[in-house]
Image: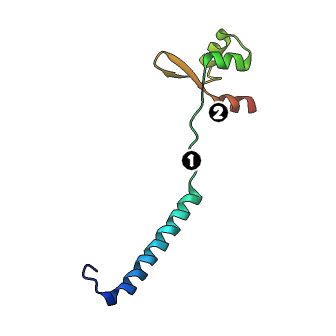
Amino acid sequence: MSNLRFEDLPKAMELVLDKLLQIEEELKNIKECYQPNEPTELMTRQEVVEYFKISFPTLHQWTKHGILVSYRMGNRVYYKRSEILDILNK
């Protein structure tokens, strides 16, 4: 439709409106299915110790025996809050 004439405008507008309706429907479907990812909240060793009211050696033993999973970032050790809450719910 590169060479449009005045007589072709109504048909061209119809096509444009149809395409816009299709795009709008697709966006609506995407919006309904969209589930944003919540960022993972990390806890420091100090926060975990205070949360469970345990000592650092106990936290170390729990990590060593696989009760809690630790994640290292450089020299720091973190625990996922969601995993800690899952352990409490068990």
User: Residue at left 74%, top 29%?
Assistant: 88
- Specify the amino acid type for callout 2: Ser
In front here: 11 or 46?
Answer: 11
Residue 49: image tag: none
Label 2 vs label 1, nearer the camera: 1
**Residue 2: quarter of image:** bottom left
- Please, what is the three-letter code of the amino acid marked with disc 1? Pro
Residue at 61%, 17% (x, y): give it: 45
- Find the residue positioned furthest to the front: 6
Q: Residues within 10 Å of mark 2 (few under 14, many from 20)?
A: few
* Mark drawn on residue 36: 1
Q: Earlier in the sequence, mark 2 or mark 1?
A: 1
Query: Left or right: 89 with respect to 78?
Result: right
- In the picture provided, is 67 more to the left or to the right than 74? right
The location of residue 70, given as percent across then percent down, is 57, 22
Secondary element at tag 2 = helix
Position of residue 4 measured from the top left corner of the image (x, y, whole percent): 28, 83
The residues tagged by marks 2 and 1 sit, at their Cα atoms, a distance apart of 16 Å
What residue is at 67 percent from the left and 28 percent from the top?
84
Tell me the residue that label 2 is attached to: 82
